[in-house]
Image (tube, helix red, strand yellow):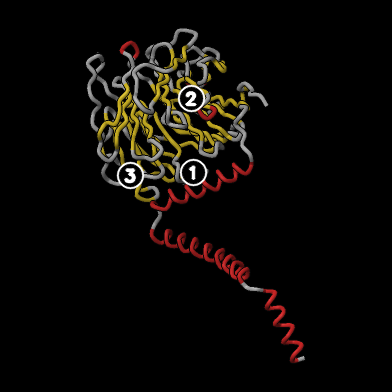
Amino acid sequence: MSSTAYVHYHTLTRGHAGTINVLAFSPDSQYLASGSDDRSVIIWNVPSGKSLYRFSFESRVDSLLWHPRWEETLIVACESGSLQQVYGFSMAHYGVYDINLGVRSHIYCLDFHPSSCLLAAGVGPEVHMTREISRNQYACASMRLPEPAANTDMDDPRYRAVALKFNEAGGQLIVTYLSHGIVCWDISTRQSIWRLVPPTTDYAIGHSAISPDYRQIVVHNFQDGLQQYAIKGKESPHPMLKYLFDTHSDSKLALQVAFLHHGRAVISGTSTGRVCIWETASGDYFQQLPHDGDTIVAVTGCQRGEFSYVATGAASKGAETYIKIWRAKIAGLSTPQYIIARATLYEVLMRSWHIMPCLSADDTQKIVSGIVVTVVSLLIPWALYRMSLLIPWNQVVQFSVIQVCHYG
């Protein structure tokens, strides 16, 4: 089986009336959430291309993410500093929980770690973290990370965070700053573990994405394309790979980037009307997705089985704003069924483990009791079977026959 190019799957219209700032596929890839300048978030059904729910906010939506623990739950951040958790979607009602960070300013980026229950937000020039203590309830206080160290080679004093990502274990937070490089913070000590500062010719970073194996980070440089850096071992300010646009790009526009195909490709928005996808092995183009000359800032992708999906959102189109969904069949990503079953079981177990700390005491007791009953019900038959193997059945039969003959 060979890989296929991305083909147009849906064009989503009659939804937003302003620039699409953020797109996110749900964990099961069935839904797409979009946030816009028109102060709304829309949930779309991916297979049908139909809009399902629309939520309104007090200002433009710049960042959102699907909650990794709870189904039908979104965390939405706005330009005004509003940070809310939206849950329980239905046609007639939905719940909203206000997350208080103790500071209110423009929120540019978010990330949530399922094991530690920590939510990180880039708020104005600062990065704040708060912990979810139970479902739809967060701690009253937040923790602020220190300001990044100044770099004498940089003329731009701004240190706004443009992207956040927890490491796998959740003990570190990798923060990409607009003009102060990339810093990996130890959460417990709030100390910098390592720092990566791009060359002064293109030090400004518009957005970044970290590979699924947490070994690479790709950044948009506001100039001619993307740079990819290694984030394991000794960090070097020199990129290991460059992905260049083949036409001149607007240097004032921050374009979003993302990894695709389990890290085998990267995608970037565009100001030239063609969304670009490169292969990470060679740095060559995999494909360019045409958008009729329109500016595309928001891009995202997901993998579902052997199919890869990409969503792209138009900017500065007003009432003609649209979202496109693309699909490709990617070679080498299919998995034997027994591995899928094992991975699914692992995911269920890990999800259950992650959810436990945020449940009430009664719910936790019921779940633990259910697990104990299930384990005991499985152990008893197994124990009886093992005991039966220790019994000398031949001698028992012979003794029984002798007894029958003797008393018969």
Residue 211, relative to residue 27: is it above or below? above
Q: Residue at x 60, y 22 (%)?
A: 6
Residue 217: x, y in percent?
Answer: 41, 25
- Lower sequence index among marks 3 and 1: 1
Crowding at mark 3 (Cα within 10 Å: few <14, some 14-19, many 20+): some
Which residue appears at 33% of the width and 14% of the height?
199
Can residue 397 be seen in this snapshot? yes
Residue at 55% x, 32% y: name it. Answer: 303
Q: Which residue is mark 3?
A: 131
User: Could you tell me residue 59's position as x and y percent?
Assistant: 37, 30
Report the Cα–Cα distance between label 2 and label 1.
21 Å
The amino acid marked with disc number 1 is Glu
Occupied quadrant, residue 172: top left
Kindly identify which residue carries mark 1. Answer: 72
Q: Amino acid at mark 3?
A: Arg
At 47% across and 11% down in the image, what residue appears?
Answer: 245
Q: Position of residue 106 (x, y in %)?
A: 31, 29
Quadrant that contains the C terminus: bottom right
Image quarter where the N terminus lies is top right
Which residue in the protein does label 2 denote? 299
Q: Residue furthest bottom?
A: 407
Left or right position of 37 against 99: right
- Please name the amino acid that badge 2 sits on: Val
Q: Is label 1 in a helix, a strand or a loop? A: loop
Residue 218 vs residue 297, the one in the foreground: 218
Q: Earlier in the sequence, mark 2 or mark 3?
A: 3
Q: Going from the N terminus, do you reach mark 2 or mark 1 first?
A: 1
